Image: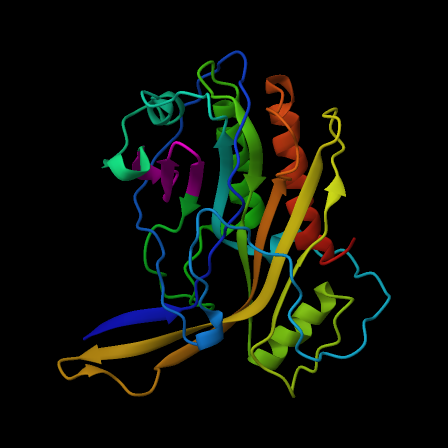
Amino acid sequence: MTRERYTRRSADNLPNQAGARHGKGRQYAAKAAKLAPACLQAVEPWATWPVNSGGDLGCDRLDNDWGPAMSQQPDAKPVDAWLAESLRVTVFPSPAASFADQRWWEQLVGQPPETQTSQPRKGGRKDEGPYQDRKLVLDCETTRIDWHVLPAGPPEESDHGFPTIGGYSEYLDMFSDLMRAWLDLEDFPAINRLAVAPILLQPVGSLPDGYQRLSEYLPSVQIDPHGSSDLVYQINRPRESRSRISGLRINRLSKWSVATIRLFTLTGAGPSSRPEAQHRACRLQLDVNTAAEFDGELPADGLIPLLQELMDLAGEIASHGDIP
């Protein structure tokens, strides 16, 4: 008898663009470990979003008649309350950039990837392998480069039942160090855009509990925890960058929902008709990225501070919720 878990999964997308060259190189080595990407099926029809590597996460608020907005600002909450389902950093290379022969994995991890897949139609390559007890993926295409940290496989037996890489703060520090090292390599390409996109989870006991928890992060939305369902709140709150890069705006996209994972028992006759167990969690998808309207390449000497700014803004949303 085996068990399979089903949960909802969504697209973390952001717009296609390109751009900037980076300076002196430093090499960072790291530990390793193996894992498989979490590719899980939605249990509610509204919870499935197609992956589109060229599109935005989105910025439209869904009209679900949630009532009048509230004016109060949410209190800061500990970032440690969130678990990380996945972490991602994305760059859009300049059209003139060339990196077909890159060896970034070896330079950063200190050894070859466990698997390497050629993608001729996309003009790219995917490197995958273990990294600090999690799965690391480098997905390179001519127009987009993604680094992912993913769970090591199906979720272990736990109170919350969701596949995660662990505490958000803990693994963000590790990922930040790795990405800073990448941005500092001599062969880092010129890029036009940069993005940080974690997906976070906060386990709750029930759907009403989840909506009550979301209401603490969403001061402009009045949620009826016991009389509503299928809630998805999605918004972009752009800001001017604090960096020295003139005219740069930062998109602060967030999508809030309550995710469900159901555990079924599989036998020779197929899955059981009723789930053996069910778990829920508040789910926060973030995509903090430099706006497409910025003209030209991002300056090489400003990339590491810019990465830190994007990560700080992601942490602000996770702590303070949806604020201007």
Closest to the observer, 311 or 123: 123
Could you tell whether 299 is left or right of 158 in the image? right
x%, y% of residue 155? 36, 61
Please identify the quarter of the rendering in which residue 44 is found.
Answer: bottom left
Dominant SS of magenta comes to strand
For the magenta stretch, what is the residue range? 124-148
**Picture layout, residue 168 above or below residue 162:** above
Residue pictured at 55% horizontal, 49% vertical: 168
Residue at 39% across, 76% down: 262
Q: Is residue 181 above or below residue 87?
A: above
Q: Is residue 132 magenta?
A: yes
Q: Nearer the viewer, residue 324 or 4?
A: 324
Where residue 195 sits: x, y (%)? 56, 39
Residue at image coords 34%, 50%:
152
Q: Looking at the picture, how far across and down is residue 240, in whole percent?
A: 76, 38
Residue 265 in the image, given as x and y percentages of width and height: 26, 79
- The answer to whether residue 56 is above or below residue 245 is below
Residue 312 lies left or right of residue 142; in this view the side is: right
- Residue furthest toward the top? 24
From the image, which quarter does the N terminus lie in?
bottom left
> Taking 276 as reference, is 253 left or right?
right
Asked which quadrant contains residue 105, the reply is: top left
